[in-house]
Image: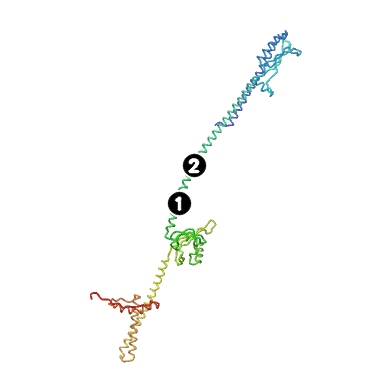
Amino acid sequence: MIRKNDTAVAAILLVVLFGTLVFIHEVRVREKAHQGIAVHAGIVANALWNHNKEGVSQYLMLAAKLENYASVMVMDTRGNVFQKVSGTSAGILDRFFSPLKLVPRQTLVSPVRYDDKIIGTLQAVWVCDTIYFDAMLLVILVMVFVIFLLYTRVVNEKKMLENRVTHRTGELSELNKHLQKEIEEHKAAKQALEKSEERYRAYFEENIAGAYISTPLGRLIDCNRKYLDIFGFENKYQALNTPITDIYSRREERRQFLDTLVEKRKVSAYETKFRKTDGSLIHLIENAAAVFDENGRLDHIRGFLLDVTEKHQLEMQLLQTQKMESIGRLAGGVAHDFNNMLNVILGHADLALDKIDSSAPLYNHLQQIRHAATHSADITRQLLAFARKQTISPRQLDLNDTVESMLNMLRRLIGEDIDLVWKTCWIIPLGK
């Protein structure tokens, strides 16, 4: 690619070279003009010596025409004009440059000699018309070089623009590829995010626990269907418009829960009693995590609730059963010890009855003691059978008598607020 500085220097050098050539040409033309006026002076010398005005006039007209003289005249030694003629009229260029005082005219003077004597002077006004051509040629050359400079500048700028366009096109192509890649990555990330949101929403909605998101002040942000079922809400709108603080059994429990959550940032297996929409109490286990903002303040809470009311009831029943079992074991132990003492009483009563006459007044008292001890022993055996601490001996029983004998004990067990009524039933043996 041609540089602008190199082109300008070359153009200036060419203009200077051409100007030098024009100057040399003009110098030679002027030298030739001076030589010519001397030749003409020698030719008119004879006519001037002989005072041949007509011959001088004719020659001067011819010389003016040939040499491009504007005027030419011959003077004698005294300065008197012997003969004078006018040459060519001013041309177009001459008329154009005359107002500008740039007409290239020069006065040429040469002595007229005859026999080595000066007899007069030949004087001519010479119009140097070659300078017009040289000047126009120089102007044209300058214009050509200016046009060439402009052309080369346009070409260079065009090439620079083409290079810039090519470079910029390459950059835009790379940028477009990078942008396309980012768009594809963005689409992939968006699709992955949508799938993740769908999975999270499915996990959130289909979770067997009551999932929720709430503010620290207790405003519910979102919840799933199980959350509605746990508390008995008819729809999500009702749940969202019910503050969480209203479903706690006691407001103190809500404050304790928040204090624990802020301190530990999450809670696990946190059991609390809540109140359903119908007012009934339920036992829930809660797992929750605290989400904080960039300033370290609690922003929202994400939690899961599991209804363990039935489990709690079963545990209470189991506890009651264990209590009853403990009481049964205690009663069995007491009944066993009491039965041992009754056996001692019965043994001594039987020994006393054997040693006393039946007609004696003390005999009846001993019979009552033995009867009471026997009855107490029967009750003790029932307690031992209830406590499963009596040795099982299979034998035939009369169910009516057996059940009837246990009525007193059953009445004591069921309490005074329940009336126990016994109706004897008769069983007819098979085959009769």
Vertical side of 202 occupied by 361: above or below:
below
Q: Nearer the viewer, residue 278 or 254?
A: 278
- C-alpha distance separating marks 2 and 1: 26 Å
Name the amino acid, label 1.
Glu
Numbered label attached to residue 176:
2
Q: Give the mark nearest the N terminus, 2 or 1.
A: 2
Q: Nearer the viewer, residue 337 or 104?
A: 104
Q: Quadrant of residue 84?
A: top right
Residue 370 placement (x, y as % from top left)? 33, 85
Vertical side of 10 occupied by 308: above or below:
below
Q: Nearer the viewer, residue 281 or 291?
A: 281
Residue 165 placement (x, y as % from top left)? 52, 37
State which quarter of the image contains the N terminus. Answer: top right
Q: Determine if residue 313 is in view.
A: yes
Q: Residue furthest right?
A: 78
Numbered label attached to residue 285:
none
Q: Count numbered badges in the picture.
A: 2
Circle 2: element type: helix
Residue 13 placement (x, y as % from top left)? 61, 27
Residue at image point 41% right, 68% down: 313
Left or right: 187, with 158 as reference point: left
Left or right: 229, with 40 as reference point: left
Q: Nearer the viewer, residue 379 or 41?
A: 379
Q: Determine if residue 271 is in view.
A: no
Q: Quadrant of residue 143?
A: top right
Residue at image point 49% right, 42% down: 176
Circle 1: element type: helix
Q: Residue furthest left?
A: 431
Mark 1 surroundings within 10 Å by alpha-carbon count, few (fewer than 14), some (14 through 19), many (20 or more)? few
Residue named by callout 1? 194
